[in-house]
Image (cartoon, grey):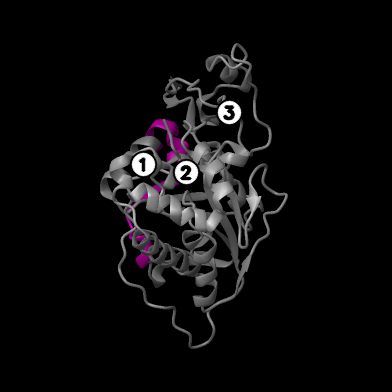
Amino acid sequence: SKLRAHSAFYVQQFGAQRWKSLVLALMQPTRHAAVLNKYCGMDEGQFLELINANKNGLSLEKSLPVPCVFSRAGKKMFPQPPFEQDVRSYYLLDPASILPVHALLLEELEGVEGRILDLCSAPGGKAFVIAQLLGERHLLQCNEFNASRRERLARNIREHFPPEIMERITVTGLNGTRLRAATDGLYDRILIDAPCSSDRHLLHNASDMGKWSVNMVLDNARRQQDLLLAALSCCSVGGVVVYATCALSSAENDECVEKVLKKAKFEVEVLDLSERLPFGEKTKHGWIALPDKTSFGPIYLSSMRRKSLPEEGAVDPHSEDRSEDSDSDSEDEL
């Protein structure tokens, strides 16, 4: 069966013992973080009261850059966020989904008018976290190629931000693999939450698991390379690109980064995230949070800084038109 083939594939990567513990953790219900929306006018005490944190023995998590509360393992503890001052009071997502934004903004944006691109933005959880950390003159572009997912993204943005913040957020529908010279060097920070195999989702959905194959993983990896190479090309010299997936396969994670580093016609530095993120483990080119060790995720991320312009006379590799459509949400929002 596809489930056995999927398991055999990952036994090769992780070893039988680690895969056994990992798949047991992946089959558990996803833990969530309720992230306070600073634009709702509610202070941290009111937030804790709203979600019944004290009654449930929960407290604010201080290790992440936004005020949030983690649910207990195996329990859905948070209701859908109510509206306060015309915006939703908090956002629900897997705590591991905050890590790529944390990495993206570890270093302050240089310049007054920093431009941030969330390249594969739907459903909008990471854009929500970025917007909590926006400086006064930073601009955020939330891009989603798939029309129905883009509509959902736009709705989430409208529901979570007041008009004065909405003025600095744009929603676009560009094909991320086909970004052109018009955007070359335009962005100071780019987040790519790349469409991927979404293995945790597959393990909980038999019909989608039935579509899984090694070729699907490799197809995803080729599209991810296109996305990452396009993003690096659109990043300013000195700017940072964070590549993230909720995939388990090395082909979609470290190997994808490694291939793009070889393809790039300009210098790229992989930034060391060791001891800079609150949970997870180091990989060759990045960081991964897996639920058998952290009870969150999976999420893989690699942070890269563009160091130079293209070599003189160099032409960036021309990629095929591989759409970045994906039906799964790595944020695992409620």
Asked if the stretch drawn in magenta spans residue 161, the answer is yes
Task: Give the number of the disc on residue 153.
Answer: 1
In this rendering, is residue 215 above or below 299? below
Tag 3–tag 2 contact (CB < 8 Å): no
Residue appearing at x 68%, y 32% in the figure: 62
Q: Nearest to the eye among marks 3 and 1: give it.
A: 3
Q: Residues within 10 Å of mark 1 (few under 14, many from 20)?
A: many
Which one is nearer the viewer's eye here, 251 or 65? Answer: 251
| Range covered by the magenta-colored residues | 157-178
Instruction: Name the residue beneath numbered marker 2.
Output: 127
Label 3, label 1: how many angstroms apart (C-alpha)? Answer: 23 Å
Which residue is under mark 3?
A: 70
**Left/right of residue 36 with respect to residue 199 in the rendered view:** right
Q: Secondary structure at mark 3?
A: strand
User: How would you rate the neighbour count of disc 3 (Cα within 10 Å): few for under 14, some for 14-19, many for 20 or more?
Assistant: many
Element on which disc 1 rests: helix
Q: Which of 150 and 57 lies nearest the eye of the viewer?
A: 57
Residue drawn at (29%, 51%) of the image: 211
Callouts 1 and 2 close, C-beta under 8 Å? yes
Label 2: which secondary element? helix
Q: Amino acid at mark 1?
A: Leu
Whether tag 3 and tag 1 are in contact, CB under 8 A, the answer is: no
